[in-house]
Image (cartoon, rainbow, N blue to C red):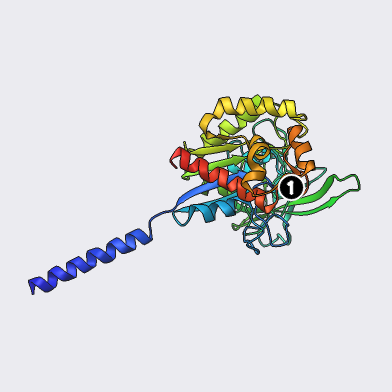
Amino acid sequence: MLKKAFLQSIIATMLFAIVSCSHEEKKQIVCWGDSLTSPHTGNGIKGKVKRMNKNDLAYPEYLQDMLGDEYEIVNGGVGGENTLTIMARQGAYPMRLAHDIVIFKSDEAKYKTFIGNNDVSAFVSSYNGKSVTPLIQCGWNEDSPAQMNPCTVNDKNFHISSESKIWKEEEGKYKVEYNYYIEADDEWTSTDTIKAGSIVNTYAMKKLRNKYANVFFVGQNGGFDDAADLIRQLNAMIEYSKSKRYIVISFHKPNEVMNTISRMKEMEDSLSRSFGKHYINLREYMINHGLEDAGLEPTQEDKDSIAKGQVPPQMMTDGCHFTTKGYEEIAKLVFDKIKELGY
């Protein structure tokens, strides 16, 4: 009898251990960014989380495959967003309502409430009061990487959505038109006004803080004044995350703020000094090692671009976004940095 009880005790202990191991939490790494981070669909369009084609992945999806089941990669990239908007979603400097909004009593509300568009700002940054524009590129979907909904405003639950149209003009520039809407998740027993300046607390602010680690790949779409301002914003996001495990990747193509290769180099030097071993200089890597690591022979066009300090065209699809080989190399860079830092 004692032997039977002893065996039952051992079996119970083993089963408990197996169950405990199976429920062990994975190390969650949140990748924040714009279209250089956001997931792809199978036809090359960015925006949705669920991949449709193994050969059309964003770097976080390659990273998930490299790290394996011990880790869970959360994609927080939405195309077209600048640093102010990414900060607003992440929580370092939340977005505020730009003006008063009337929420109708539930049994009287027939439609979602319009709150803004291209001409009427819906949200402003609590960092500097400038307009922020989340959810423009497919970010409103339920499986969206925006990590915004459900959100709360003044302790009430809402869903914020957008309707947008994006097109490319003859000169190659992208144009966008959009409308923003808000819809109450809770029952409203009376019509009320939510005041301008009220903070929008996103899903990410509630659910993606205190995660194991974060990767910040931001800045290609601007949103900062200079290198010092970009560093301030990155430090704010790192501090808000409450994780000391982080990686910073610098963008690779000159933009309206850093409009020359010389300015890019100055920014990269500042980022390197500020973030040290946590920093990845993507432009420099792609110039010096990208083609070789991807198994590609440089063309004359590649050589000409490299001589100018630009990423070789073979690694790019449109002068800004990367090929699948390019995104895979970015994932390898992040993977190697994770191992180097002991994450």
Which residue is nearer to you in this view: 15 or 134?
A: 15
Characterize the local packing of mark 1: few (<14), some (14-19) or many (20 or more) Cα atoms within 10 angstroms.
many
- Decide if residue 18 is on the left or right side of residue 224: left
Q: Quadrant of the C terminus?
A: top left
Percent of width and height locating residue 120? 80, 42
Which residue is nearer to you in this view: 109 or 6?
A: 6
- Decide if residue 221 is on the left or right side of residue 168: left
With respect to residue 227, does 8 lie above or below? below
SS under mark 1: helix
- Decide if residue 126 is on the left or right side of residue 119: left
Q: Residue at x 62, y 58 (%)?
A: 49
Residue 201 shows in the view: no
Percent of width and height locating residue 198? 64, 40
Q: Residue at x 61, y 57 (%)?
A: 185
Q: Mark 1 points at which residue?
A: 314
- Decide if residue 332 is on the left or right side of residue 41: left
Percent of width and height locating residue 203? 57, 49
